[in-house]
Image: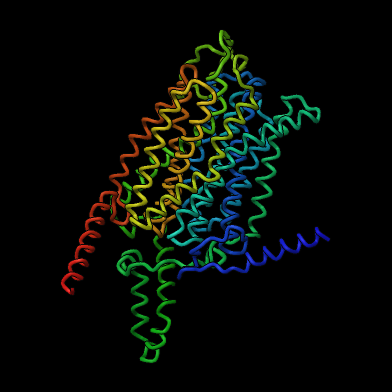
Amino acid sequence: MSYKKSSNLCQRILRKIQAKSISEDEFGKAKSFRFFSISRPHMRGFHTSWFTFFVAFTSWFSIQPLIPTIAEELSLSKVEIARSGIASISVTIFARVIIGPMCDKFGPRRMMSAIMILGSLPIALSGLIRNGTGLLIIRLFIGIIGASFIPCQFWTSAMFNQKIVGTANAIVAGWGNLGGGFTFILMPALFELVKICGADEFLAWKIALVIPAALCLGVGILIIWTSDDCPQGHWSKRKLPEVNLKVSVISSTRYNDDKKDAMRDKNEGDRKSEQIGIGVEKNQVANEVAERSGSSMFCVAGSYWMYFTVFVLSVHYGLSFGVEIAVDTVMNLYFLYRFKKENCTSASETHVPPFNLTNITTMSSPFHVTNDCSILSQNTASLIASLFGLMNFFARALGGVFSDLLYRNLAISGRLLAHMICLTCEGIMLIVFSQMTTIPSAIALMIVFSIFVQMGCGSTYSLVPYVNPRRVGVISGLIGAGGNAGAIIWNTIWADMVNDDQSRWFWVLGICVLVGSFFTLLIPIQNQRIWTLRRQNEHKIESKSGNVEEISTKL
């Protein structure tokens, strides 16, 4: 009886949650959240977005926790491992650039499904790896799944109003990126479980990788029938903001000429009906002009400053998300390489020829990684590295909330200020982390700098919907690709430093992030920069003093 009562109570609570309506704006976008609701379209799209990205991120880095075992079986060197990490990121750049415009055309639901299904195939085939070149090629194709970030952000941008879109984007991206930490818990657990069932360690890692592949495939098929592209349902039914008539003349002159000819033939009675339906017609014109404008994403503004803004935000995303991805691919290895037993020399500690394009797949080292001098084991290092990704549970959302908070008080300038603060703190914490010489202090500083890295990601994408509201998909793709481009640069530097002092790599990252944060002062968004805060304060002071003078004269 008690079970039935508790079950009925849960059902009543869920019904009340589902019954609560969400206020919408003129485009059907939600102006508030109902986190415990899965009702369509807004909250269903919200939860589908972050969960699919979570599965994608878990699968994307599913090989990384098992790298020490794979390296031992295939006799891989540190540099070969580092190059496979570069490969897992590089293809994502091109995939994200392509997926952005495709989201604009087909909607986020179908594109997310396609990415998940395609990405599951190379993960399932990972057990066929026989050498370093095979590992590099497999991780190259697995990197396709990293493009899932674009439809993830696009989905919430289509579902939520601009006042809360920063928070929405940050939450779904943060909870999705949580998979980067979760995979360092899941994969070692699956690895040990398969070993308990009787497989040796070299067979166990191959079987363990089938699980994330199956998850990707199942989720990719499921979301086709269980979610919506936008508040209106199918992507073709979406509402778009009105466009300026000047733009419509430039981008579709023939179209407007045809409309003028048709208007001349209308009689007086038709004019009245036209006035009644003018709102609907404007929306139709906006939709058609948007389709005719195609991929010319900067046709509305026509300003070089917009190109510059997108470029700087791409660099900044490379300094935040790029750092996150690069750290995800090396953090467990960093703890294995950095903290060693005293007076212990490993055969793997030998010089390897420097990285260059001519030997990226052909060079191998007879001295493979053994980690026999490391204080930590493969599973312990993975568990520690998981803490970095697990900060995504709240940290990326915190960046979006921080940005939204300053936006309410300081408009777009507030978002820019929040973004600069996050990047500056990230750079400082990276430099401090590089100086840590004990495992406890390194873990503590890793958690702190991880929080600011994720906040920087959230603050970056809280700016994206304002750069060009009609081309969010294209801009999201370009900036997202910037994140992966940054990760490739950082991983290439890691490959060059991995046989020397690995901590110096984090010092270099910190300096680059600090320098890059100052470019926030230069970018304009909706004709506002950070220094316009001073003018706003002066206007507020003038208005307050004017009100005081009026009150005094009345008295």
On the rendered image, what quadrant is the N terminus found in?
bottom right
Q: Measuring from the top left, give residue 547's x and y in whole percent.
A: 22, 67
Question: Toward the viewer: 425 or 112?
Answer: 425
Q: Hey, which quadrant is residue 193 in on the image?
A: top right
Q: Measuring from the top left, give residue 402's x and y in whole percent.
A: 42, 50
Q: Is residue 109 above or below residue 523?
A: below
Q: Residue at the spot x=29%, y=54% of the render?
A: 528
Question: Toward the viewer: 149 or 297?
Answer: 149
Q: Measuring from the top left, give residue 313's x and y in whole percent.
A: 38, 45
Question: Toward the viewer: 321 or 253?
Answer: 321
Check the image and name the residue furthest to the front: 555
Q: Residue at the spot x=37%, y=38% of the render?
A: 424
Q: Hey, which quadrant is residue 74 in on the image?
A: top right
Q: Is residue 313 above or below residue 292?
A: above
Q: Residue at the spot x=35%, y=44% of the render?
A: 311
Asked if residue 495 can be seen in this view, the reply is yes
Asked if residue 464 can be seen in this view, the reply is no
